[in-house]
Image (cartoon, coloured by chain):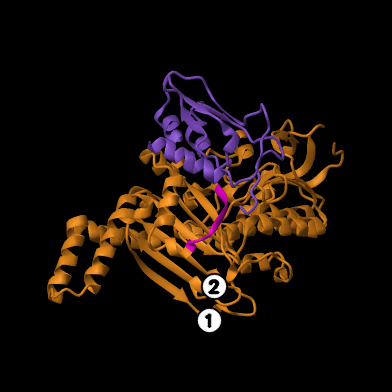
Amino acid sequence: MTIAVTKLRVEEKLYQNRYLVDPGRPHIKVQPHERPSANLLALTHICPAKCYELNDKGQVETTSDGCMECGTCRVLCEASGEIVWNYPRGGFGVLFKFG
Amino acid sequence: MIEEEFDAIVVGAGMSGNAAAYTMARQGLTVLQLERGEYPGSKNVQGAIMYADMLEQIIPDFRNDAPLERHLVEQRFWLMDDTSHTGMQYRSDDFNEAKPNRYTIIRAQFDKWFSRKVREAGATVLCETTVTDLVRNAKGKVIGVRTDRAGGPIYADVVVLAEGVNGLLGTRAGLRKMLKPQSVALAVKEMHFLPDEVIEQRFGLQGDEGCVIEAAGTISRSMAGLAFLYTNKESISLGIGCLVSDFAKTMESPYVLLDAFKNHPSIRPLIAGSEVKEYSAHLIPEGGYKAIPQLFGDGWVAVGDAAQLNNAIHREGSNLAMTSGRIAGEAIIEIKGRNQPMIRRNLALYKTMLDKSFVVKDLRKYKDMPALIHTNSRNFFMTYPQLMSQAAQNFMRVDGTPKIEKEKATTAAFIKARSRWGLISDVVRLALAWR
């Protein structure tokens, strides 16, 4: 129940934002893994755009369309090589109206 | 794409990048500024409070046309538990002055204005351009950048890295280390729109007067964190941030914290009936003096959030950013004036000048605070706010209990929660770190 509620809650928030999605070019990728590390698993809770989710096999997947490019996941999981993070191409990604 | 070689390339069009680009362009340097957003400000997030003095030193007459929201006359500090807040507030008519000291701003609007000033000063500003790489010569000196636009590298004598807290260039090039989870906070924020007269009524404001609330306590669920509410002209910026290391440990969701803060009985009536128009998230450097990375090298300097120049205790960031950008610009102008190369030895001037400014002096003053707050977050953000609330309620509630017994109960509660030694040690450590 709580998962569905929080997901809805974040989606409602992200719906207010303006994005220019670069189709077919996600700027974040999760490397293939058997079991996620504690930090990677934490992203499913702490990513402010809820870009990270667990699949049926217990692995972490990402959909970066709603990403606000804060870099929290980079701080936690880039050094270990679990994720690959690049800026979206110029002009793409989140476009804050107020910031 | 661009054949010309520039005196300086500035990466990023936030506060520090705009300050650096403006300072250099005004003195006649050829400046190229690259911004990955669609427009300057489109990737930038701040609370936001802007401190006039630091902008005045760059653009003295900014008040003529800068998009300012409200000048601040009142600041409230709240210690919150789940049902209450214990507060300290300061309001003064002295802040209603000809040249007010602090303003709330909306970054996307402010940054567009600042960028227009940069272009008017003569810099070339290119948006929708992500810098992907630094170009170095055989000796390792940075001599330019590569971008995601068609065409080859663009060259310059010096590159100013104003790429923000989540700057990829400097970390990928090995100029500085990746941020540590315990020296950076994740903040989420919403923009709540209300008619200006409603805001003025709710906060007791007249005209362009503004009020800010900064709050800590059980709202951060024992994590080291801070919430805020800033009044803009026709909107309220409201948010909460906590250390990334604490988020990772507790697995709390930032949006859940934000919604809980909005629903707190002390906050809810202030934003009732508002229309939310944006939800944003951003990192804030919190490591202070000890986390400042290498600030200069052969052909490059780092400024603003990219250099982690943020005073977490006073919640000042953009003024340190503006000042470091200005000083970097002035150092580069000085070196250029002497016809010297933009190498490490000469660019050390930037650090020397910055060390003499309030930027480094303030950060040095609080050098031990980040570690103290990080290691004692439960006490400072959960135990003490609860104790303060109980003590205040105990003091105010009249129920026939003799006052002497009430006082004893309050003292006993503090000792039970932290022990005598714990209380003394908390006070001493806080005083030492503050000194």
Image mark 1: chain: B
In whole angstroms, how far apart are the C-alphas of marks 2 and 1?
Answer: 16 Å
Residue that mark 2 sits on: B200
Q: Which residues are magenta?
A: B271-280
Crowding near the residue tagged with mark 2, few <14, some 14–19, many ≥20 C-alpha atoms within 10 Å: some
Residue that mark 1 sits on: B93
Crowding near the residue tagged with mark 1, few <14, some 14–19, many ≥20 C-alpha atoms within 10 Å: few
Left or right of residue B424: residue B372: right
The question of residue B176 being in magenta is answered with no
Three-letter amino acid code at disc 2? Glu
Q: Residue furthest right?
A: B3
Image location of residue A47, percent across then percent down = 48, 38
Task: Say which of B70 and B17 sits in front.
Answer: B70
Is the C terminus of chain B in the top left, top right, bottom left or bottom right quadrant? bottom left
Q: Is residue B210 above or below residue B155?
A: below
Q: Secondary structure at mark 1?
A: helix
Q: Earlier in the sequence, mark 2 or mark 1?
A: 1
Three-letter amino acid code at disc 1? Asp
Image location of residue A91, percent across then percent down = 71, 40
Q: Quadrant of residue B215?
A: bottom left
Image location of residue B427, percent across then percent down = 29, 62
Q: Residue at x 39, y 30 (%)?
A: A38
The question of residue B273 being in magenta is answered with yes
Q: Colour of chain B?
A: orange
Q: Residue at x 74, y 53 (%)?
A: B21
Q: Colour of chain A?
A: purple
Task: Say which of B213 and B176 sits in front.
Answer: B213
Task: Say which of A35 and A15 sits in front.
Answer: A15
Q: Secondary structure at mark 2?
A: helix
Main structural element of the magenta stretch: helix, strand or loop?
strand
